Amino acid sequence: MFRTTEGSTGRLIQLCIGYFIFYVITGVSVKYFTGRPELGFPGMNQIEYLVYSTFGGSLVALSVVLVLRWFKLKSNKMISWGRLRFPSEVLYIIPSGVCTAVIIPTTTMMYLLPISVMVAMVIMRASVIIISRVVDAVQIKQGILTKRVYWEENIAVVFALTAAAINIFWVGPNDFDFAASAVALVILGSYIVAYSLRIYIMNYYKNTRAKGVKLDNNGFFAIEQIAASLTMMLATYILFKSPEWFSTVSAELITFRDSIATPHSLWSLAVVAGFAYGIVAFFSVFIFMFKGRTATFAGLVNRLTSLVAGTAATLVSYFAFGGRFPSTQDWLALVFIFIAVGFLTRAERKRMQELLLAHEIESSAKTS
């Protein structure tokens, strides 16, 4: 049951299950730690939680890649700068890591807006679904991607975007008006730009492996995470010192500095809660770069899994902590998500046959 082969549907399902579990934990943790203290929650400031959870997530990812030495990437070509010799792919994986350093905090910031976990996930995931489809179109035109996007994948994109539109534009009298919030739009804009570059780089790496060179997703992930961690360390130092360097700073920057200088009493627990987000990163990258699939398909699988996880997280928050119950539009969006999943299932069956005929995967991968 648990033994699957590379590129198989079974392996893809395993990744989705792991992604779902740890994203539910991530979504519930955000709402718990930032809940109102008069209701029995820690009442942690949103920026404080962002700092602690981001640190926890990065610590997990970085520790694994360093301990297991995943950074020894199997490369198309080694290049030399003086005495330094390294894989040529490093030149574009590092920028992907910088983009990841933007994506990590903006993801958490989206959850901290006064909207349900489900709505936050729908908005972010729909954005990435569009990006994935555009990346496929660009790389097909460039000759980098030789596979075609099945019509079922395009239909799934339409239903996934419909799910997002429901939550973005169906605004009730007591709902957060996302489109009218400048802060929300800046956060989402940063998220989209960073993810656009990152998904293009991921698929460029996947689609340009030389014959006989293994698709080393572990190596890609390791170098990306090292670059992301160094970038976030630099950004943290600059933000921490900003109140000293500038005469006028925002209240948010002061809170950021205080979260480190005088940490919350429960900061260590928030760091531990952030471990789940660090684990999610593994599943997320490995789904995005899944062998033999288009960016459209992988992006849909990745994002739809987290959307369903958002529903589960919202329900858990409601029953365990008395949070907001999913609204009518949330449930309607979920219906469209499952329709999209149905079309993806059809596309996966066709893709498996294609990969088997091309001998890109082993024949046993069809069922395992």
Image (cartoon, rainbow, N blue to C red):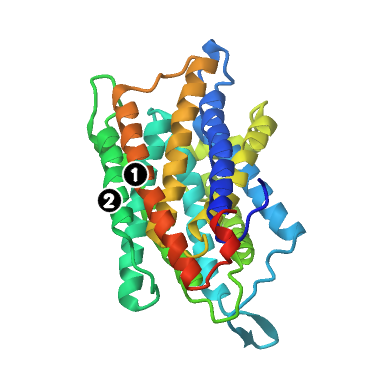
Residue at x-position 55% and y-position 61%? 7
Residue 168 lies left or right of residue 220; in this view the side is left
Element carrying mark 1: helix
Residue 231 lies left or right of residue 299; in this view the side is right
- Label 2: how many residues lie within 10 Å, few (<14), some (14-19) or many (20+)? some
| Of residues 29 and 164, the one drawn nearer to the viewer in this rendering | 164
Residue 37 lies left or right of residue 64; in this view the side is left
Residue at x-position 69% and y-position 70%? 72
How far separated are the C-alphas under marks 2 and 1? 7 Å
Residue at x-position 44% and y-position 55%? 298
Q: Residue furthest top?
A: 38
- Of label 2 and label 1, which has the lower sequence position? 2
| Of residues 257 and 350, the one drawn nearer to the viewer in this rendering | 350
Q: Image height check: is 299 above or below 177?
A: below
Residue 348 drawn at (x, y percent): 43, 55
Residue 251 visible? The answer is: no
Marks 2 & 1, CB-CB < 8 Å contact: yes
Question: Residue 178 occupies which quadrant of the picture?
Answer: top left
Q: How many labels were placed on the picture?
A: 2
Residue 276 visible? The answer is: yes
Q: Residue 364, which numbered label? A: none
Tell me the kind of residue under disc 2. Answer: Ile
Q: Quadrant of the N terminus?
A: top right
Per the image, the residue denoted by label 1 is: 340
Residue 220 lies left or right of residue 311; in this view the side is right
Tell me the kind of residue under disc 1. Answer: Ala
Per the image, the residue denoted by label 2 is: 155
Q: Image height check: is 93 above or below 167?
A: below
| Of residues 335 and 219, the one drawn nearer to the viewer in this rendering | 335
